[in-house]
Image (cartoon, grey):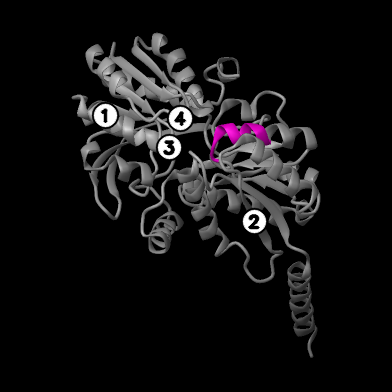
């Protein structure tokens, strides 16, 4: 055997040994606490669908297995904390993830920060999840107060001096969106009239829809919780509000389908959409594979949960020690500088765990049994603290 051949054989043996060593180690466990029942179940179940698609390619041969332990928090903050504690103490997970509700995420945030457990938030957008001094929490989704800011920017560009009716459910996410909108509106010359807040558990908006119609707004920003969002939207349409006047700050596939054909012409905000023209090759494959597996197209929730799994994989691949040491995992998240594989949107976190903010506005063109068609009508980016988010929402 020549020296060159001996070197090649040795190198191959070392690679094989390393691969065997990685494969032989215990799995890296991540606790995935999300909403599979309760008012936010349509978000949580969508998130898990995105996660499952990621898991199908997440553990190639030779790499240490990454395992997600999924638990239902029932859309209850107390249940979310109990699950987080159990995963931390009993299952010894390296990190926590999973919530799509800001209320449950805030409860887990307190536990994670106090107990120094890395917490990767895929979807929940309440600003205080990355308030100054945050150390162990990293949020992939832009903060919700910024969504309100972006809506005003869009409206002011379409019609200077416009009037918005603001109707929303009394949940943390909705309060944050409203706070950003109300902060930016006077600065952009936009008027809000009326502002109507629905208590949690509301299921009818007949009287309030009439109030909105009487105010004769240019746009109506609709932020209902769970199934009530569909009720609220349809009751506004019933009373004579046109679809083109309605703006939903966010829209996932199940929501858009529930709004139905009557909603064609209405607008929604998003951070990923199957109808966006600039998706990467992997993004297009993600849409195709998800549709084949779930009989519907994915939206930003599924995408964020898909990408969250990939982000955690990248952190462990960059430093194998991060699979066993929470401080190394936290450092790996803090140092991350990558892009979403599906859209090429950059992923990097500031000192508090927040990303650079961005938002697409889409207009619905058609709704069918299989999905929906929409087109991009606006895109904007902003820094996390372009508005005083941490003072606005506490």
Residue drawn 31% across and 45% down? Answer: 257
The first of marks 3 and 4 along the sequence is 4
Callout in the foreground (3, 2): 3
> Mark 2 sits on what residue?
68
- The reply to whether discs 2 and 4 touch (Cβ–Cβ < 8 Å) is no
Q: Which residues are magenta?
A: 100-108
From the viewer's perspective, is 59 left or right of 282? Answer: right
The answer to whether residue 291 is magenta is no
The first of marks 3 and 2 along the sequence is 2
The first of marks 4 and 1 along the sequence is 4
> Mark 1 sits on what residue?
235
The first of marks 1 and 2 along the sequence is 2
- The reply to whether discs 3 and 4 touch (Cβ–Cβ < 8 Å) is no
Choose between 85 and 160: the one closer to the eye: 85
> Mark 3 sits on what residue?
226
Q: Which mark is residue 227?
A: none
The first of marks 3 and 1 along the sequence is 3
Choose between 228 and 302: the one closer to the eye: 228
Q: Quadrant of the N terminus?
A: bottom right
- The reply to whether discs 1 and 2 touch (Cβ–Cβ < 8 Å) is no
The first of marks 2 and 4 along the sequence is 2
């Amino acid at each position: 055997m020549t020296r060159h051949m001996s070197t090649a054989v040795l190198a191959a043996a070392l690679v094989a040994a390393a691969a065997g060593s990685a494969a032989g180690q215990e799995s890296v466990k991540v606790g995935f606490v999300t909403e599979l029942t309760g008012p936010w179940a349509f978000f949580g179940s969508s998130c898990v669908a995105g996660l499952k698609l990621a898991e199908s390619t997440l553990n190639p041969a030779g790499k240490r297995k990454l395992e997600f332990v999924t638990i239902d928090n029932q859309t209850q903050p107390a249940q979310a904390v109990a699950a987080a504690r159990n995963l931390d103490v009993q299952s010894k997970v390296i990190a926590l993830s999973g919530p799509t509700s800001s209320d449950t995420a805030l409860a887990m945030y307190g536990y994670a920060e106090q107990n120094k457990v890395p917490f990767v938030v895929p979807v929940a957008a309440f600003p205080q999840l990355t308030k100054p001094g945050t150390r162990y929490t990293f949020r992939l989704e832009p903060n919700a107060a910024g969504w309100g800011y972006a809506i005003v920017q869009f409206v002011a560009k379409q019609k200077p001096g416009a009037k918005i009716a603001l109707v929303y459910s009394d949940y943390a996410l909705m309060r944050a969106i409203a706070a950003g909108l109300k902060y930016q509106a006077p600065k952009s010359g936009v008027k809000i009239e009326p502002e109507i807040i629905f208590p949690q558990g509301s299921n009818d908006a007949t009287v309030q829809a009439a109030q909105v119609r009487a105010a004769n707004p240019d746009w109506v920003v609709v932020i209902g919780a769970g199934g009530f969002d569909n009720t609220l939207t349809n009751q506004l349409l019933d009373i004579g509000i046109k679809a083109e006047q309605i703006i939903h700050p966010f829209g996932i596939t199940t929501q858009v389908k529930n709004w139905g054909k009557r909603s064609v012409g209405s607008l929604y905000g998003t951070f990923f959409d199957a109808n966006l023209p600039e998706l990467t090759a992997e993004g297009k494959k993600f849409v195709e594979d998800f549709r084949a597996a779930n009989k519907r197209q994915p939206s930003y929730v599924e995408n964020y949960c898909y990408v969250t799994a990939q982000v955690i994989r990248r952190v462990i691949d960059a430093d194998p020690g991060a699979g066993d040491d929470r401080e190394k995992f936290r450092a790996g998240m803090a140092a991350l500088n990558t892009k979403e594989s599906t859209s090429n949107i950059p992923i990097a976190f500031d000192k508090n765990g927040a990303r650079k903010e961005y938002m697409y506005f889409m207009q619905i063109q058609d709704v069918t049994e299989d999905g929906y068609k929409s087109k991009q009508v606006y895109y904007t980016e902003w820094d996390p603290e372009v508005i005083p988010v941490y003072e606005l929402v506490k």
